[in-house]
Image (spheres, grey):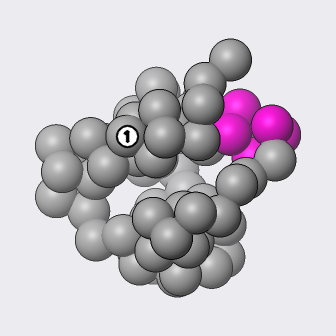
Amino acid sequence: MQTSAEFLDEIETFLRENHIAPSRFGRVVMDDPTFVFALRKGRVPSLDVCARISKIISHHAGWAKYAKKDQE
């Protein structure tokens, strides 16, 4: 199980490596463009949210599926 800081670090690394804006990532995975900014300010996500987002990040195909829905 990850700490909130480790979870945020996982997201930040994914964003940096894939040149994705935090607002777009939040909008795509949570329907909340402020999600990453809130995490940076200390928001603590539920375990379900962490698991879902970690799965999306670990499977780039999962990100592509979500990102495509955002563009439609």
Residue 49 against residue 23 in the figure, above or below: above
Looking at the picture, tell me which residue is in the foreground, 20 or 50.
50
Identify which residue is drawn at 16% across, 58% down.
19
Q: Position of residue 4 (x, y in %)?
A: 59, 41
Give the side of residue 11 with respect to residue 53, left or right: left
| Image quadrant occupied by the N terminus | top right
Disc 1 crowd rating (10 Å Cα; few below 14, some 14-19, many 20+) is: few
Question: Is residue 42 on the magenta stretch?
Answer: no
Give the side of residue 10 with respect to residue 21, left or right: right
Identify which residue is drawn at 37% across, 40% down.
9
| Residue type marked 1 | Asp
Magenta segment? 47-51
Q: How many marks?
A: 1
Dot 1 falls on a residue whose secondary structure is: helix
Q: Position of residue 51 (x, y in %)?
A: 71, 32
Give the side of residue 16 with respect to residue 7, left or right: left
Q: Position of residue 47 (x, y in %)?
A: 80, 37
Most frequent secondary structure within the magenta stretch: helix
Give the side of residue 55 with respect to residue 57, left or right: right
Residue 53: name its quadrant: top right
Looking at the picture, tell me which residue is in the foreground, 37 or 69.
37
Residue 9 against residue 3 in the figure, above or below: below
Kindly tell me whether residue 68 is visible in this rendering: no
Looking at the picture, tell me which residue is in the foreground, 22 or 40.
40
Kindly tell me whether residue 64 is visible in this rendering: yes
Task: Quickly name the residue at label 1.
Answer: 9
Identify which residue is drawn at 66% across, 76% down.
31
Q: Position of residue 32 (x, y in %)?
A: 63, 79
